[in-house]
Amino acid sequence: MNILILRSSFQSDDFVRTEYAELLGLLKDKCNAEITIIGDETVGTRCATSLQDVDYVMVATGGVENLFKTLFDDRTRHATSQQKFTLIADGRNNSLAASLEILSYLSENGMEGRILHGTNDEIINDIVGTRRATSQYLQLFSGTRIGVFGNPSDWLIASGIDYDYLRKHFGIETAFIDLQRLIDGVGTTAQTDILAADKTYSAIKMICQKEHLDAMTIRCFDIVKACNTTSCLALAKLNDEGIVAGCEGDMQTLMTMLLAKKLCNEPAFMANPSILTDKTSMFAHCTVPLSMCYKKNMRTHFESGIGVAVQGDLPLTDYTILKWGGRKLDKFFVTEAKAIKNEYSNHFCRTQITFDINLKPYLLNHPIGNHHVIIKGRHEAEIRRFFTSFLAFRRP
């Protein structure tokens, strides 16, 4: 773990070592920390990317705000992705005041951060506990194997993911499946809608079993064109059987669904925001886990009018709406809401549900892609703990 300590030019490195001797000793002993101290007069000797590999920034004195800004500005010119900053300030020597100014600066520049403030024991316990939780969270996905059936749909221009990052940071392996393999399994001869949907389910499940997949996503519209059917019913059934299944090749949303399953043990409804008002938000999509619905109807595919799958009515109860996004999964959104209506309209995808929440400020200004994930129950606190812990220690 790397800790960068900032001090003003009115103080020396020796002052910091003496003033914070107990805390620095605990950081080394309990957290295996490597510590670097810099001031205004020494910043020129630091490389421009000195904030890139830092886990914590300890503010030792006041008057270091411009020092942080210099390092931050240099870092942003070289950074490949965002990083959440955690500032340490016990309050002595105007350290908390300086940290508050720095945190405000980060917020104004669209960055997340927090201040770790308290006694030495409280600071150490927070660091140790957070790192332990992060390690446990990362183990959630270890050994997971995801199948990508074809490329993401052409309209998903902001939903890609760094597959190498998934492997290195989560232990997730990705298998790329040629869609022709599935098309051959379904067949292209004329058949009833029910038979075609069932054959699609069987073909996808067989590939999942042969490839030992825990999750999968599919470029579904190519199946519509080639086989005159959809994979909607197949994905609904697979989600209920424990294989996390998403559509349109959207890997960011699939990772969100996988998180919901691993962390909350809930199947997920992957949906499009469709109608937003100042009081409500309606979501809709073409496939939904059957276990989430209390009532089911068979309907054709919304866009193409081809095939058959389930349109489900979801209970009017509490839900959590979330999204984990960014090519390196460095963004998130999560909130809770109550479902108030699930009426059907032929102007939207099959399954539709309306919540008593205004998501316009988020979705119309800074959304994380199009698809969002909906799960039953109130899980915001648990999911937010995961995101906060994970993003606090992620590296570019």
Image: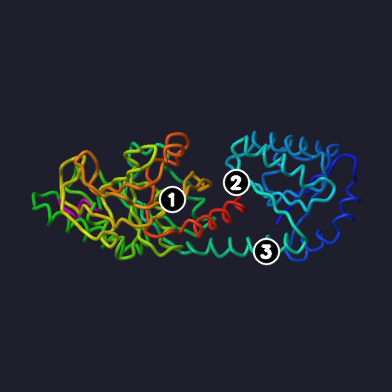
> Is 245 left, or right, of 191 in this rendering?
right
Label 1 belongs to which residue? Answer: 322
Mark 3 vs mark 1, foreground winner is: 1
Label located before the other in sequence (2 or 3): 3
Label 3 belongs to which residue? Answer: 128
Residue 46, how many percent across, how many down?
78, 40
Residue 12, how many percent across, how many down?
90, 46
Query: How many numbered discs sit on the rendered protein?
Result: 3
Mark 2 vs mark 1, foreground winner is: 1
Cα–Cα span, label 2 and label 3: 22 Å
Give the class, few, some or many, for how many residues have Cα within 10 Å of label 1's Cα (few <14, many ≥20). many
Q: Look at 32% across and 38% down and name the residue there.
A: 275
Label 2 belongs to which residue? Answer: 396
Numbered disc 2: secondary structure = loop
Cα–Cα span, label 2 and label 1: 23 Å
Residue 251, how many percent across, how many down?
40, 49
Quarter of the view holding residue 390: bottom right
